[in-house]
Each structure stands twice: as structure tokens, then as C-alpha cells.
Amino acid sequence: MYFESMDIKLIYFNFPFWRAEVSRIALFHAGIKFKDVRISSEDFSNIKTNGKLKDGTIIPTKALPCLTVDGVSICQTGAIARFCGKLSGLYPNDDYLACASIDQILDTCTDITNSLSYPPNFQNENDQENFRKSLCQVDGKLTKYLKALNLLIKNYNIIIKDLSPSPHFTIGDLATWGIVKWLKSGVIDYIPTNIADSYSDLILTHNRVSELKTVQEWLSKKY
Ligand SMILES: N[C@@H](CCC(=O)N[C@@H](CS)C(=O)NCC(=O)O)C(=O)O
């Protein structure tokens, strides 16, 4: 196989955030050997200062995740997920429409993640609370992105069903599952844990992916 001789490392923090989990689970699902590197806060300071890990591994954007393949460093969640998805059979090889349908899901998951970051000048708790609450209003950014993701997933499900053979799941499902799991987890201050509950297609995907044997095995092995 093309990947059997590859030396693959996936570098991220030691927690199950979707940005890394999509690719970790894709590789795990396909039984592809990779080093699941979990870095400490000291390692991350090194990255911020030098753009490298202590062992010399280059992190080009100084942000994680970063994948290295035979010593070549690849950054950006979407690029890494597509690469790992292609290796693991969880991203279509030659159906460009299905690929684009998955890409827009990954990009919207990134939009959702970015939308939750506090603006740099919002240092006090009051500002932070107001900021996050405004995202959840009817016309708020998070509401807008969740509505969009729900619609994208609905359309994606139709496109994927028509593929032959139709994949059981793809990196698009894993990303959606990861985002909904994160929103439900209670770790995001001021965001209600039921914020995704009214988006039925998101919840269906979340529940279906949670029950996949691969996902259950991964979670019980790693956390
Ligand atoms: N555009 C990047 C953003 C990655 C990113 O922001 N990662 C966070 C961790 S989830 C990070 O490394 N933040 C530290 C920083 O940017 O200084 C991607 O899509 O992967």
C-alpha cells in the first residue's frame, strides 16, 4: 500500500478536539500506523517562539494540528483531514462534487470554531460573556453557522448516498460529530450545551457517528 512505508506523525495537544480527532480517527479506522504526538504547554511555547518542536520538527504556521509525513510538515486542519481521509478511504478519490460537499462542511466547522474566539480586546469576563451570548442570538454568528452546517449536512447526505459504493461515513461526518460533541461538552463558557439540539441533521450525524465501532474503540482506548 502507498502509505505503508510512510512515517506519519500527528502533532496536537492532549485533548480530543475535533481539529485533531478527525484525522486521528480516520488513520485509526484504516489501521494506518502513525505517531499520535501529544504536546505539553512547554512544547507549545517552543513552537510559538521558534516555529519548531525541541526535536527540530518544523510547525510552519506555529499553530496546531500539524502532520508530518516523512519529515514534511503539513499544517491546517482541512488539509490534514483531507490527506488522512484520502489515505484511509474516508474522502472520495474521484468524485469532485462529493469532495466539495465534504470540504464545505470542514470549512464551516472551522468557521464555527473561529467564531467562538474572543476578540483580543475582550479581556474581562463581562465582555466575554456578552460576546458569546451575542453569538447565540437569532441573528448571531454561531446561529448562522449552525443553520448553514445543518443544511450542508442534509445536502451532503443525499450526495453521499448516491455514491457507488456509498461510504458508511467520511471525514465530513467525523468533523460534524466533533463540533457537536464539543458544543455539548460544557467546556465552552457561556454557550448553552443544548445549542445544537434543534438542528436535527446535526444531531442525527452526531448520534450515528458516536455509535460507530471505530469511534467507540478510539475513545475507550485514548481517554
Ligand atoms: N487555521 C488553522 C488554525 C489552527 C489553530 O488555531 N489551532 C489552535 C489550537 S486548536 C492553535 O494552535 N492556537 C494557537 C495559536 O494560534 O497561537 C487550522 O485550521 O488548523
Image (cartoon, rainbow, N blue to C red):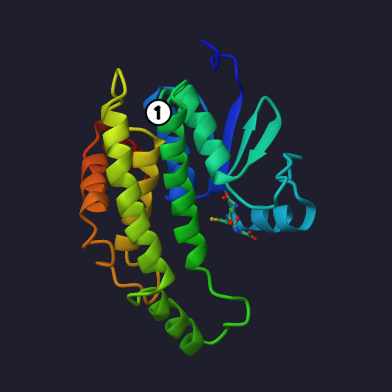
Q: Quadrant of residue 118?
A: bottom right
User: Which residue was labeled with disc 1?
Assistant: 90
Please report the residue visible at 31 percent of the width from the left and 23 percent of the height from the top.
163
The percent coordinates of residue 15 (x first, y second) are 45, 52
Question: Which residue occupies the foreground of this view, 186 or 96?
Answer: 96
Residue 187 appears in view: no
The relative height of residue 110 versus residue 90 in the rendered view (above or below) is below
Please state if 189 lies on the left or on the right of 67 as rendered: left
Please state if 62 lies on the left or on the right of 82 as rendered: right
Kindly state the secondary structure of the residue where label 1 is placed: loop
The relative height of residue 214 versus residue 22 in the rendered view (above or below) is above
Residue 71 appears in view: yes
Please report the residue visible at 24 percent of the width from the left and 67 percent of the height from the top.
194
Please report the residue visible at 39 percent of the width from the left and 80 percent of the height from the top.
133
Q: Quadrant of residue 74?
A: top right
Question: Which residue occupies the foreground of this view, 203 or 193?
Answer: 203
Amino acid type, callout 1: Leu
Please report the residue visible at 23 percent of the width from the left and 52 percent of the height from the top.
203
